[in-house]
Amino acid sequence: MTSPQRSVQNNILRSEELPAIQIKIDPQFTYAGNTNFILYDIAHVEQHHFIVTDAQKRVQRRLWFQFEGYLEDNHRKYNYSGMELLTLNGFTFLHNSYVLNIEEAYRERPTSDSAHVVDYLKEKGSVLSGDVMSKRMVWLDAALRNELMIIYSEILDPTGYRVSDLTEGGASTAEWPALSQALHERALASFTIV
């Protein structure tokens, strides 16, 4: 694989293109490194990972930055219809929030970009597992061929809820809007576009 196109120093992620951006990450997060690969034979991916872990090295919170673009041998475009707009320091993102179980998602899509995250962090000695809630923010270039995806995640344990409580048919779905809004605020507090 090619070497990463972006760099991290003093918890600042720098990208020269697609997009040209500098992102300062909250110092509570430790940089866990980067990986790059070809996803599903159609897109190149460069991931950068910042994590907060407990004493057992289980990831409590994470910031996952993914620079992705379709390969030149296809004509695909990214489509995130139905997501709301969010502007951060002049950059427009589409965003949403969701809950999922890490192991279940891994079983369903063992070669996905998120499965790569689990494998990469495991190689580095950290465990990403259990039920999580996530905030996804996506920047797209004008051609809709390249994206920067920022995913902020937290384990659900401290809330007392499980994924099954907060998804359709769950007993606590009415609680999700408030949980989601608080998650949104913590996500935006975890990094700054400078």
Image (cartoon, grey):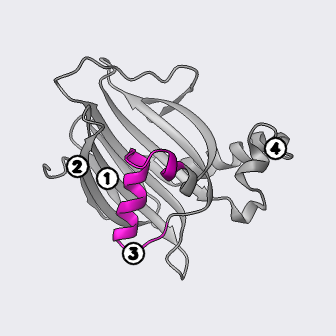
Q: Residues within 10 Å of mark 2 (few under 14, many from 20)?
A: some
**Residue denoted by label 1:** 13
Which comes before the other along the chain, label 1 or label 3? 1
| Marked residue nearer the N-terminal end (2 or 3) | 2
Given this view, does label 4 or label 1 mark the residue nearer the observer? Answer: 4
Instruction: Tell me if I can see residue 152 in this picture.
Output: yes
Q: Are marks 4 and 3 in contact (CB under 8 Å)?
A: no
Instruction: Name the mark on residue 6.
Output: 2
**Nearer the viewer's eye, disc 2 or disc 3?**
3
Q: Are marks 1 and 3 in contact (CB under 8 Å)?
A: no
Q: CA distance from mark 1 to mark 3?
A: 22 Å
The span from disc 4 to disc 1 (Cα, nearest Å) is: 38 Å
- The three-letter code of the residue at mark 1 reads Leu
Return the disc, 2 or 4, that comes first in the chain's sequence. 2
Give the alpha-carbon distance from disc 4 to disc 3, as whole Å: 34 Å
Contact between marks 2 and 1 (CB within 8 A): the answer is yes
Tags 2 and 4 touching, CB below 8 Å: no
**Image quarter of the C terminus:** top left
The residue at 69%/43% (across/down) is 180
Q: Is residue 54 magenta?
A: no
| Residue underneath mark 3 | 125
Question: Label 4 is placed on what type of residue?
Answer: Gly
Secondary structure at numbered mark 4:
loop
**Nearer the observer, disc 1 or disc 3?**
3
For marks 2 and 4, give the one nearer the viewer: 4
Instruction: Give the number of the mark in front: 4 or 3.
Output: 4
Q: Position of residue 185 (x, y in %)?
A: 63, 47
Image position of 94 (left or right of 24): right
Q: Is residue 27 above or below residue 114?
A: below
Looking at the rendered structure, the secondary structure element under dot 2 is loop
Bounds of the magenta span? 105-127
